[in-house]
Image (cartoon, rainbow, N blue to C red):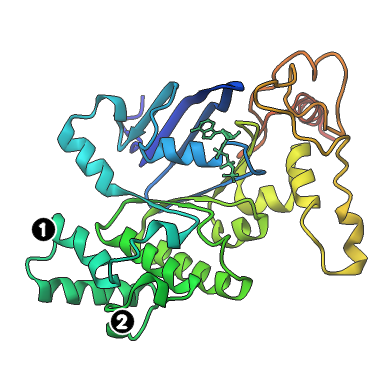
Amino acid sequence: MSDIVEPAPLIALRDVSQVFHTKRGDVPAVRDVSLSVGAGDVLCLVGESGCGKTTTARIAAGLTAPSAGTVEFDGVDLASMDSRRRHEFRRSVQFVHQDPYASLNPIRSIFGTLSAPLRRHGLAKSKAQAWEQSKELLERVDLTPAENFLPKYPHQLSGGQRQRVAVARSLTLSPKLMIADEATSMLDVSIRVGVLRTLTRLRKELDVGFIFITHDLAIARYFGTGGKIAVMYLGRIVEYGDTHEVIDNPRHPYTKALLAAVPEIDPDQRHAHDTGLRSVDIPSLTDLPSGCSFHPRCPLYREGDCDSELPLLSSVESGREVACHVVAEQAEHVDGEAPR
Ligand SMILES: Nc1ncnc2c1ncn2[C@@H]1O[C@H](COP(=O)(O)OP(=O)(O)OP(=O)(O)O)[C@@H](O)[C@H]1O
């Protein structure tokens, strides 16, 4: 037996589920999700609105306790952490929200926003030190000359500049894991690219792990280079693998439909707009279809198993997992073929 012990991933969600009890009935927002992110790695979570991306991210950040399953950070179960470890965890995991305007205090200057956590955690001993460190943080996120921005208030900045401040604030406590939830989706396209470039540079420079949530597959492809992607549908992961490989060669019919729905500028590529879906309506989480939740929309639908048996994620090729009866069966046939 080998003595080599694999390091624990930075964060690991194991069989995590989240049910919200509402007047409409129980909403199973996340169902049996398992995923992990290592130090310096990136995982993109993609899928349509309401598929459970934010709930998964909030569970990973310890902002919501899951109804079932466990979350481990650095190998320690969140539920069993003592207050010191929990404090460390809170410092180590930072969330960047979609709307920087809502997440920044309007009556606090940028210096006030950045210096508060530095002073509170004893990282800056004096106002002068806090000023220098805040300046460095703004330079890190390409807001220069930093001293011009520090006295300003959020309303005096553009959307892109505000999001850069939100990113700078998330860096104040030197996190190990950043969770970016649609962090660029509210920005104009031209500004979005600049903020994405900054985030990509930070990812490389700081060696932090990233959970990057987006509904935009082009953005996932750009930011998730060299990382993994998990495609979610109605609370479950339906496809998982290397980001570029999944986007360039999707296997699950839902991932294919998501990619086909991406608008195409080139008129020769217009056929790509045909998603192949049998229905555009997304079923309700309070009244999920039997078997595979995707079966009422699925172009590969097969009566018998798809509408009665839940497909679990299974390996269909090296490094690729797909939750689909038909794709799994096709993969088995390919594997079972006699070598020619
Ligand atoms: N606190 C809550 N109480 C009740 N239902 C909730 C709550 N939070 C989320 N939901 C529901 O859970 C489902 C998943 O929501 P979630 O925000 O995780 O999805 P999402 O993929 O991030 O979508 P979006 O991109 O629109 O934010 C949705 O049906 C949502 O209405």
Task: Mark 2: give few (<14), some (14-19) or many (20+) Cα within 10 Å.
Answer: some
Provide residue 240's location: percent of width, then percent of height: 61, 39
Residue type, numbered disc 1: Gly
Q: Residue at x 28, y 71 (%)?
A: 109
Q: Is residue 210 left or right of residue 303?
A: left
Quick one: 219 or 129, which is closer to the camera? 129
- What residue did someone put label 2 on? 146
> Does ligand 1 reach within 8 Å of label 2's beta carbon?
no
Q: Are marks 2 and 1 in contact (CB under 8 Å)?
A: no
Q: Give the position of the N terminus as an image quadrant.
A: top left
As measured in the structure, the alpha-carbon distance from the residue carrying label 2 to the one carrying label 1 is 22 Å
Q: Residue at x 41, y 72 (%)?
A: 155
- What residue did someone put label 1 on? 122
Which corner quadrant of the image does residue 133 belong to?
bottom left
Q: Is residue 283 left or right of residue 23?
A: right
Q: Residue furthest left?
A: 125
Q: Secondary structure at mark 1?
A: loop
Query: In which quadrant of this rendering is ligand 1 seen?
Result: top right
Quick one: 86 or 177, which is closer to the camera? 86
Residue type, numbered disc 2: Ala
Query: Number of numbered discs present?
Result: 2
Provide residue 307's location: percent of width, then percent of height: 80, 17
Provide residue 225's location: percent of width, then percent of height: 56, 59
